[in-house]
Amino acid sequence: MPYFDPEPKKCREDFFNAEKEIEEFKRGLNVSKLVVVSGLRRYGKTSLILTALNELGVDYVFIDCRLLPSGMISVNDLLMLFERELSRRGWFKSIVTSIEGVEVGGFGVRFRRRDFNTLVNVLERLEGRVLVFDEVQELRRSRYRFDSLIAYLYDHVDVKVVVSGSQVGLMRRFLRFDDPSAPLYGRPFYVVKLKPLTRELAREFLLKGFEQEGLQPPVELIEEALNIFNGVIGWLTYFGYSYARLCVRDLTSVLETAAKLAYEELNQALQIFNVGRPRYEAVLKLLSERSSSWSEIIRYIESKHGKIPKNTLNNILKNLIDMGVVEKSEGMYRVADPVLRYAIRKYL
């Protein structure tokens, strides 16, 4: 699979510069029952997980929690994802007949009973396998405590659990590793963290990707793309795909399309803040223009919306960081994603 193919990668030679992370992930599965893969959106988390699991040759179940419906989710919603995934796993069909209330046919795997006990019974049959929850923080939108389910598997079932999340703070808030009253508190886990490419590696990625496509774009275009997309491999892939496969030669057009996608994702995420949304938008507008200190942010917000309690601003910044939208480094805040910075400046 070429570098610029937009689908998640599943083998090492297709996954650029990930040797260290692949080996680290494998080590995590070897030494721990719970592996946490973190990194912002479009950093390659899904590709890392699939590539490493395929190299290991283990049976696994991959649940993409992004496919869950918006709003509150039910056990039935999660069971539907399991039906879809397990129907593709031939090894599961050979053991499913021992589970009460589960049918197998030409239609795949179906659960006659749609309750929490059925879900537990299914998961208990995953002995010796790997269970992946991609974007696990989405499970927080339920009245069920799915972190309790993960803790049960950790304690009582011989199954490895992998969780990933691009909204790192929300993922940790859901899993509650640091809360003494939480089900997963005190249980060892292994963390694999993905970071953006350096400029040198990002340039190498683009050059090798275009070489695979039999193309040699102008050096100036490569450098301009690096200025825009930085080291975010998902956006670099999108640029390469647009140029090589869709024959889009105008970098501005690529950026505009990417920005609309990034803005739509942000717009959906901000809907939960209702009447507080204008303050969130004001913070984002400032941080899309420049990195700012806490003092600079509160002065800016109060100039736009009047007096704001300090704890309110702290909560806004914490929520934006937890969502993976804003990052903090050495006391300075900024919008993390380069394309999202552009999208906020243009559309928000």
Image (cartoon, rainbow, N blue to C red):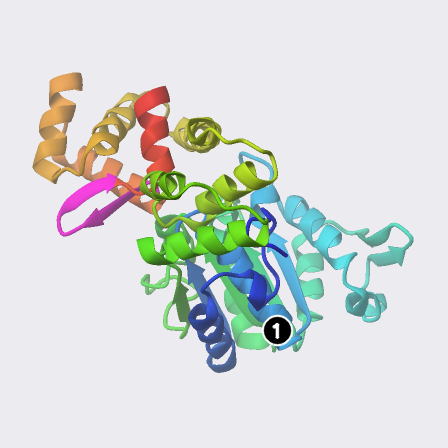
Q: Secondary structure at mark 1?
A: helix
The local crowd at label 1, few if under 14, some if 14 to 19, many if 20 or more residues have their Cα within 10 Å, is few
Tag 1: amino acid: Glu
Q: Position of residue 198 (x, y in %)?
A: 32, 56
The reply to whether residue 307 is in sight is no
Quarter of the image containing the N terminus?
bottom right
Quarter of the image containing the C terminus?
top left
Looking at the image, residue 277 sits to the left or right of residue 311; the answer is right
Q: Position of residue 345 (x, y in %)?
A: 30, 24
Q: Which residue is mark 1?
A: 55
Q: Position of residue 48 (x, y in %)?
A: 52, 62
Q: Residue at coordinates 36% horizontally, 63% vertically from top-left? A: 177
Residue extending furthest right?
A: 106
Residue 262 higher or lower than 158, as above or below: above
Q: Residue at coordinates 71% horizontally, 70% vertically from top-left? A: 125
Report the magenta residues as a range: 325-334
Looking at the image, residue 284 sits to the left or right of residue 96; the answer is left
